[in-house]
């Protein structure tokens, strides 16, 4: 399993580097206002994705090892169509989609939803290398297309990025579909009602948690646009993307962890595994975050341009939340993997309360700093709830929270194996 984690971290690291290059391209050649518009478009697509995930989301990872795949595949694809259309219409009526981009949000949401269904099936089958490969290729295609449009076609507007999304999402969908196809066996759909009920029961609990968590991450965009302006949304979004890049270790761990726990019924093993991974995730996040915060503001201005002078300030205000949420990211797969995702939902709901209060109180008064501080408070309160529940569930003692020499040695050994190419990165 640790080989999969290390390989996944390697893939996520490459993805993060490409994503950073995309952020730099957007910042330099599209400008803060266009970056703000792109951020709101991506947010609308992400909201649609959360609605899609009520059926075609992480619940599939839990259900794939336990259910006939065809009975999961068909309703998931149908729901992708319905959720993409209905969600886009509702957001257009609520003026949550930037003007003129409704059709693009709807079509891109559909492609992303199908792609996500396929990748959840791959995870449920513990085909982590396949998942890593298609996820990596998606951002590579986006990078290639956007670079070509900016430097060859000389197109430097929001539609350049939208075109890149069309190419990358459709490519990723087709590739992931052909990965899933060999193990997809047609079967009668008769008797599927119990399966549908299980999908909605499990998926609904998980998705309310994910929806709450998305708004914890992104609701500040709407507050900033309302109380400040679209260009400030662009600056804040760059700081957020950089900060969230620090979570690539935690998210790589959690992805493999969720797949492993979902396929294993040993509760004691799940507790031990989660405890070890939480400690490792926290230490690595602390070290990476500390290094980034030591970089001067001039460094970020040099990378992204003068319009993004306050990116460093945004990251400083987010720092406490980034560190605490690295723990939450690694605890969440435990609750989902043992069939108790409601604890993640409660955690996210607690965080959302603080996000809303902080957004209304802090952003109008102290701008970007208020957005970052609000997010940090939200992440911290949500994580505290999860830690308390997990500690009670696992009957932890204080010494159980300490990182052991054996865990550090194990991590060092696995990293050395990758460096020596003993573990091929997908």
Image (cartoon, rainbow, N blue to C red):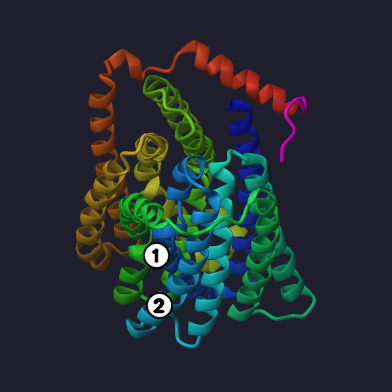
For marks 2 and 1, the one nearer the N-term is 1
Residue located farthest toward the right when viewing the structure as drawn: 152
Vertical order, 333 against 113 (above or below):
above
The region drawn magenta spans 420-426
Could you tell me which quadrant the C terminus lies in? Answer: top right
Give the residue at x 41% y 61%.
Answer: 50
Q: Residue at x 44, y 64 (%)?
A: 52
Give the position of the N terminus as an image quadrant. top right
Dominant secondary-structure state across the stretch colored magenta: loop
Q: Of 382 and 295, which appears nearest the observer?
A: 382
Q: Which residue is mark 2?
A: 86
Which residue corresponds to mark 1?
51
* Residue 147: quadrant of the picture: bottom right
The image position of residue 268, as x and y in percent, is: 37, 20
Q: Are marks 2 and 1 in contact (CB under 8 Å)?
A: yes
Horizontal and vertical percent for residue 100?
49, 88
Task: Indicate yes or no whether the magenta region holds residue 73.
Answer: no
For residue 48, side relative to residue 386 (left or right): right
The residue depicted at 66 percent of the width and 71 percent of the height is 164
Q: CA separation, marks 2 and 1?
A: 10 Å
């Amino acid at each position: 399993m640790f080989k999969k984690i290390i390989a996944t971290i390697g893939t996520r690291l490459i993805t993060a580097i490409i994503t950073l290059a995309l952020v730099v391209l957007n910042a330099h050649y599209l400008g803060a206002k266009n970056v703000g518009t792109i951020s709101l478009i991506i947010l609308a697509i992400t909201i649609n994705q959360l609605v899609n995930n009520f059926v075609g989301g992480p619940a599939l990872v839990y259900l794939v090892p336990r259910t006939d795949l065809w009975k999961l595949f068909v309703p998931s694809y149908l729901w992708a169509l319905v959720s993409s259309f209905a969600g886009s219409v509702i957001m257009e009526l609520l003026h949550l989609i930037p003007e003129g981009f409704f059709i693009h949000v709807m079509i891109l949401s559909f492609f992303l939803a199908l792609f996500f269904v396929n990748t959840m099936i791959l995870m449920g089958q513990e085909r982590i290398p396949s998942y890593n490969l298609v996820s990596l290729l998606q951002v590579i295609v986006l990078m290639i297309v956007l670079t070509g449009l900016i430097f060859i076609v000389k197109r430097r507007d929001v539609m350049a990025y939208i075109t890149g999304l069309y190419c990358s999402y459709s490519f990723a969908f087709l590739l992931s579909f052909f990965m899933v196809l060999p193990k997809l066996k047609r079967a009668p759909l008769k008797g599927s009602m119990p399966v549908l009920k299980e999908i909605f029961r499990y998926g609904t609990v998980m998705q309310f948690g994910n929806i709450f968590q998305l708004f914890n991450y992104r609701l500040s965009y709407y507050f900033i646009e309302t109380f400040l302006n679209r260009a400030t949304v662009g600056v804040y979004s760059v700081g957020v993307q950089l900060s969230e890049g620090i979570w690539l270790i935690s998210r790589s761990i959690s992805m493999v962890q969720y797949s492993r726990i979902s396929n294993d019924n040993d509760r004691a093993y799940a507790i031990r595994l989660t405890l070890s991974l939480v400690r490792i995730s926290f230490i690595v996040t602390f070290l990476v975050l500390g290094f980034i915060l030591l970089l001067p503001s001039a460094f970020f201005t040099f990378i992204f341009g003068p319009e993004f002078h306050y990116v460093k300030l945004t990251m400083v205000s987010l720092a406490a939340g980034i560190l605490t949420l690295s723990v939450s990211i690694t605890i969440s797969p435990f609750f989902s993997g043992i069939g108790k995702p409601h604890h993640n939902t409660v955690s996210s709901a607690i965080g959302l309360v603080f996000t809303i209060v902080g957004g209304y109180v802090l952003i109008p008064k102290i701008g970007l700093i208020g957005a970052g501080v609000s997010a940090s408070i939200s992440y911290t309160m949500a994580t505290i709830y999860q830690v308390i529940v997990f500690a009670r569930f696992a009957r932890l003692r204080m010494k159980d929270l300490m990182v052991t020499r054996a865990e550090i040695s194990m991590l060092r050994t696995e990293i050395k194996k990758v460096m020596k190419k003993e573990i091929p990165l997908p």
